[in-house]
């Protein structure tokens, strides 16, 4: 069973993680100190079964987060809080949480509740497997309602969005350009063996966006703008990982992604700048955009094929 813990109290997260591991309930595959750090597609790729979430958090509280996750997270949620107001507890249950546990947390209560939720998940899984088997028998000779292309499109979108989130650039304007490049590379069968040049990628994406009838001058402007947006996004990602590494050099995301997507001297230089006591603007940095895009494509491909499994940023 896979758990994700969201609580702004680091000590509480540590205690819950220790309880889960000591009682052999499963593994904690991720943590967050605020609900704003949690997205449904992120929990999906982490394959989270049970979300333990605090009600009161400074950015987005537990109830707002559960409401935000509706339709994108299919796992179970257990809420933990000092709040005892019946209205808030009732609202939490109305949004579909399994249990509401009051702080201060009690090990016996936590373990008992989590075992009950675990048993329910296992039962639902067994029933689902039976229903799936029956459905396959019934529909064996029926035509498929959706072709493989639609499923492929959805998968590319999900894997790309997940990686953008991991790289800290899901909200950057260049994220849209990176997704467009990713779609192009997935459709190019030669990409894995010999990735196209940046010019070829940007030209193809620009023509797709503007249409084949667009004037060459317009295409050239879009190519330049797209390249600039992607470059800014890549630099933002570099700063993101340098910040992670400065805070915690053993951070699993930093360990896995930083050296894969970037030349480490650039990451190290940025970390030293961030650690400097003087308040000075960050120096210009060169980034290898082709390397970044190639690794982005290969990571998305591995995730899509299921050959890699994300767990706290490590495979």
Image (spheres, rainbow, N blue to C red):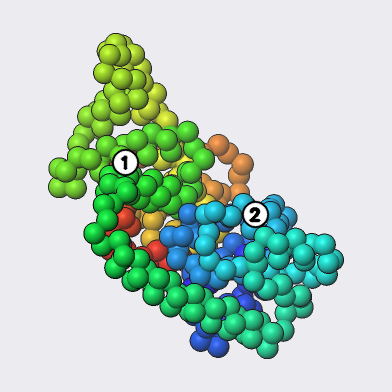
Give percent across and percent down for residue 10. 65, 69
To which residue does mark 2 refer?
Answer: 67
- Residue 140 picture quarter: bottom left
Q: Nearer the viewer, residue 303 or 228?
A: 303
Q: Quadrant of residue 129?
A: bottom left
Name above or below for residue 226 compared with residue 235. above
Residue shown at the point (53%, 82%) measured from the top left: 119
Q: Quadrant of the C terminus?
A: bottom left
Q: Give the residue displayed 62% in from the left and 52% down from the top.
A: 68
Could you say where residue 225 lies in the image, as x and y percent from the top left?
A: 39, 23
Mark 1 and mark 2 lie on one chain; the one further toward the N terminus is: 2
Q: Residue at x 31, y 41 (%)?
A: 182
Q: Secondary structure at mark 2?
A: helix
User: Label 1 to label 2, Cα distance in Å?
Assistant: 31 Å
- Horizontal placement of 281 versus 105: left or right? left
Q: Residues within 10 Å of mark 2 (few under 14, many from 20)?
A: few
Q: Is residue 59 visible?
A: yes
Q: According to the image, label 1 marks what residue?
A: 182
x, y percent for residue 200: 22, 29
């Amino acid at each position: 069973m896979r758990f994700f813990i969201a609580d702004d109290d680091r000590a509480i997260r540590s205690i819950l993680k220790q309880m889960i591991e000591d009682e052999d309930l499963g593994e904690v595959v991720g943590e967050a100190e605020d609900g704003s750090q949690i997205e449904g597609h992120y929990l999906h790729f982490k394959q989270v079964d049970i979300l333990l979430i605090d009600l009161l958090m400074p950015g987005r509280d537990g109830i707002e987060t559960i409401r935000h996750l509706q339709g994108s997270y299919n796992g179970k949620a257990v809420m933990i809080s000092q709040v005892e107001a019946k209205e808030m507890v009732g609202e939490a249950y109305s949004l579909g949480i399994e249990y509401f546990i009051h702080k201060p947390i009690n090990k016996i209560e936590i373990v008992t509740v989590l075992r009950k939720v675990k048993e329910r998940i296992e039962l639902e899984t067994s029933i689902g497997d039976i229903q799936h088997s029956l459905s396959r028998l019934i529909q064996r000779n029926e035509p498929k309602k959706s072709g493989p292309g639609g499923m492929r499109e959805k998968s590319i979108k999900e894997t790309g969005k997940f990686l953008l989130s991991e790289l800290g650039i899901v909200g950057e304007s260049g994220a849209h350009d990176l997704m467009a490049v990713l779609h192009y590379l997935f459709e190019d069968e030669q990409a894995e063996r010999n990735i196209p040049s940046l010019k070829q990628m940007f030209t193809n994406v620009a023509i797709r966006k503007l249409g084949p009838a667009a004037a060459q001058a317009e295409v050239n402007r879009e190519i330049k703008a797209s390249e600039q947006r992607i470059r800014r996004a890549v630099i933002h990602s570099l700063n993101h990982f340098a910040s992670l590494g400065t805070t915690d050099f053993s951070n699993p995301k930093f360990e896995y992604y930083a050296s894969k997507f970037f030349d480490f001297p650039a990451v190290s230089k940025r970390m030293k700048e961030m650690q400097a006591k003087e308040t000075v603007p960050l120096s210009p940095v060169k980034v290898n955009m082709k390397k970044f895009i190639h690794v982005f494509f290969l990571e998305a491909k591995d995730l899509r094929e299921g050959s890699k499994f994300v767990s706290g940023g490590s495979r």
